[in-house]
Image: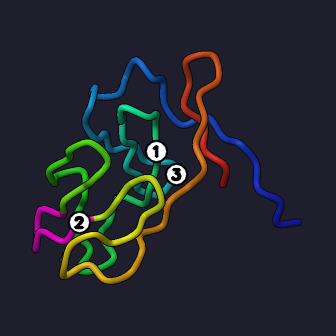
Amino acid sequence: MGDKVWRDLVAVSALQQAWVTRVDLGARPLAVYDTPTGIYVSLALCNHGGADLCDGYFDGHVIECPLHQGAFDVRDGRPVDAPATRAMKTFPARVVDGVVQIEI
Ligand code: FES
């Protein structure tokens, strides 16, 4: 009970390259980031005020929220710019046969 499993999320070919792509897993809105060091996944809604991070600006490993410009490092979720102060929720991600999977 409660064990995490790897679940298929999206084909790598469906991602916007070097950018963030919104993918909903059931009712859970997720943000999938294509970066120079691989693919990372977080909850899509900003933990400061609920904005959709997928509408923000993405550069390298940092997603900037479109509402108040708070920013997070997508590799571990840590906040890197105010007003974001809490780490965002991230999920372990891997690619198998061209498909992004997350452990959830
Ligand atoms: S809602 Fe994202 S920084 Fe405020």
**Three-letter amino acid code at disc 1?**
Tyr
Q: Nearer the viewer, mark 3 or mark 2?
A: 2
Residue 14 placement, left or right of 17? right
Q: Is mark 3 within 8 Å of ligand 1?
A: no
Is 67 contained in the magenta span?
yes
Amino acid type, label 2 = Ala
Q: Secondary structure at mark 1?
A: strand
Q: Left or right of 69: which side holds 18? A: right
What residue is pinned by disc 3?
26
Question: Which of pointers 3 and 1 lies earlier in the amino acid sequence?
Answer: 3
Q: Name the residue that disc number 2 marks.
A: 71
Q: CB of mark 3 within 8 Å of CB of mark 2?
A: no
Residue 7 position in % (x across, y down): 66, 40
Q: Position of residue 56 (x, y in %)?
A: 16, 54
Query: Disc 1 marks which residue?
Result: 40
Please state which of the two labelled residues, at mark 3 or mark 1, is closer to the viewer: 1
Whichever of callouts 2 and 1 sits on the residue coming sooner in the sequence is: 1
Instruction: Give the magenta-colored segment's residue range.
Output: 65-71
Asked where in the image residue 1 lies, by quadrant, the reply is bottom right
Identity of the amino acid at label 3?
Answer: Gly
For this view, does 64 lie left or right of residue 97? left
